[in-house]
Image (cartoon, rainbow, N blue to C red):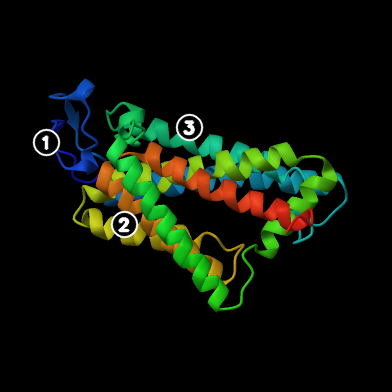
Amino acid sequence: MTAGPRLGTVRITMNEHPTADPAPDLAGALLPRPWGFWSTLGFALLAFLLAHIVVGGIVWWLSLSRGEVLSEAALDDPTLPLLLIVTNVMLIVMLAGASRLAGWPAARYLGLVQPNRRDVIVSIAALIAVMIALEALTWLLGRASVTPFQTDAYRVAKTAGTLPLMWLAFVVAAPAGEEILFRGFVFRGWAASPLGPLGTVALTSLIFAAIHLQYDWFGIFQTLCLGALFGWVRWRGGSVTLTILLHMAINLISTLWTAAKVEGLV
């Protein structure tokens, strides 16, 4: 895994582009250049694959211990919310380690900084606008707001008595892991590469949507739109903390709506 061009340092100043996440406590600090394009891709893939291989091995072992075959039915195992939590924790830890190897404070490299009030207000307004537009498109196409994946996952967790774990996995763990991966680690390296911030927003949004194979084409399209929104928020304000909170808000609303549908409240 080559590091790519990382010669020189980056001086954090209060007038720097938002992709550098300027902050008073690091004003004037000298930091190494982020990982290059290919190094960023390599570290991200390694962390993603290792986390999923370990968890996939656990699922496989659990299936064999019950005399089952790892199939689509086995993927509805009620322990999967816990495994999803473990996967994202492992992913975040490995990305933090790669950030430290780059010579940066991990939180700084991953964009885990406090957003300013204006960015919060603008981002919430943008999120509301995108959600209204997507919901209107959903209605025009005659599609359901809740996908079969969401209702099936809720029913399995309810039957197994693991609803608290499901909420934690869907509303906290998954948004945190995905945002730290795409808008944190990958954005940091790719935005500083020849790809640039705009190309990074586009490419990370496409990859972000592509990994959500639990949805049909329309669900993937919606994920693409949300990924582009998160990328724009990251580019504009420099705070992955804010994109995590926005992502959590979307998943919370989606899970609440799923619960209401399954429980017959709507």
Q: N-terminal of the two: label 3 or label 1?
A: 1
**Which residue is outermost to the top?**
25
Report the residue at 65% width, 54% height from top.
Answer: 257
Asked where in the image residue 207 lies, by quadrant, the reply is bottom left
Give the x, y percent position of residue 178: 48, 46
Query: Foreground mark, 3 or 1?
Result: 1
Count residues near mark 3 (Cα–Cα under 10 Å), then give few for <14, some for 14-19, many for 20+. Answer: some
Report the residue at 54% width, 60% height from top.
Answer: 212
Is 24 situated above or below 72? above
The residue singled out by tag 3 in the image is 93
Report the residue at 44% width, 63% height from top.
Answer: 224
Report the residue at 74% width, 41% height from top.
Answer: 163
Q: Is residue 255 left or right of residue 192?
A: right
Q: Amino acid at mark 2?
A: Val
Give the x, y percent position of residue 255: 64, 50
Label 2 element class: helix
Q: N-terminal of the two: label 1 or label 2?
A: 1
Q: Amino acid at mark 1?
A: Asn
- Measure the alpha-carbon separation of dots 1 and 2: 22 Å
Give the x, y percent position of residue 199: 26, 60
The residue singled out by tag 2 in the image is 201
Q: Quadrant of the N terminus?
A: top left
Given residues 233 and 119, the one toward you in this image is: 119
Label 1 element class: loop
Q: Amino acid at mark 3?
A: Val
Given residues 128 and 106, the one toward you in this image is: 128
Query: Foreground mark, 1 or 2?
Result: 1
The residue singled out by tag 1 in the image is 15
